[in-house]
Each structure stands twice: as structure tokens, then as C-alpha cells.
Image (tube, rainbow, N blue to C red):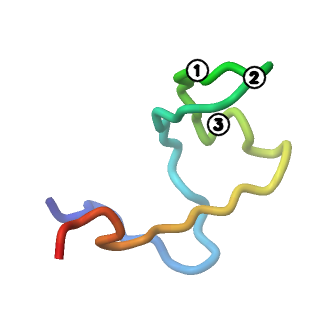
Amino acid sequence: MRPTHALRVGDEAPDFCLEAVVVENGKRQKKRICLHDYRGKQAVILTFYGAAFTPV
């Protein structure tokens, strides 16, 4: 699948949501994390590890 819009340095990231496992009060819980929950409130850093979980 090819992106329909390529982002450039300085562009605002489009909103997205991810499923995550977080630990709250000592319990592991599934949680949906969305960029719009953080936009304008705190900085968000995204890191991509290409092929990090891919068999060699």
C-alpha cells in the first residue's frame, strides 16, 4: 500500500490510534492510545523500527 500523502519535515502528523498494553496500578491493561489525546498538551515522539520483529 502506498501512502496517499507523503509528510515532509515540519508537517503536522495526521491523527491515528494504536492498541497498547499499559501498566496502571500494577495491572496490565489493553488501551487505545490516540494522537488527538496528546495534541496541544505534550510532545509526542514516534520511533519506527523497521523489520524489528521480522524473522531474518
Image quadrant containing the N terminus: bottom left
Residue density around tag 3, few if under 14, some if 14–19, many if 20 or more, within 10 Å: few
Q: Are marks 2 and 1 in contact (CB under 8 Å)?
A: no
Nearer to us: label 3 or label 2 = 2
| Viewer-proximal residue among 32 and 30 | 30
Residue 55 x, y percent position in the rendering: 18, 68
Q: Secondary structure at mark 3?
A: helix
Label 2 SS: loop
Residue drawn where x is 61% and y is 42% of the image: 35
Q: Amino acid at mark 3?
A: His
First in residue order: circle 3 vs circle 1: 1
Q: Quadrant of residue 10?
A: bottom right
Identified at 37% across, 71% down, the residue is: 6
Callout 1: SS:
strand
- Amino acid type indicated by mark 1: Gln
Q: CA distance from mark 3 to mark 2?
A: 26 Å
Relative side of 1 to 18, left or right: left
Amino acid type, mark 2: Gly
Disc 1 marks which residue?
Answer: 29
* Disc on res. 36: 3
Residue that protrudes farthest toward the right in the picture: 41
Residue 5 on image: x %, y %: 34, 64
Residue at 56% from the left image edge and 24% from the top image edge: 31
Pointer 1 local density, CA inside 10 Å: few below 14, some 14–19, many at least 20? few
Give the image quarter of residue 25: top right
Foreground pick, 25 / 4: 25
Residue at horizontal 75 percent and vertical 22 percent from the top: 26
Residue of label 2: 26
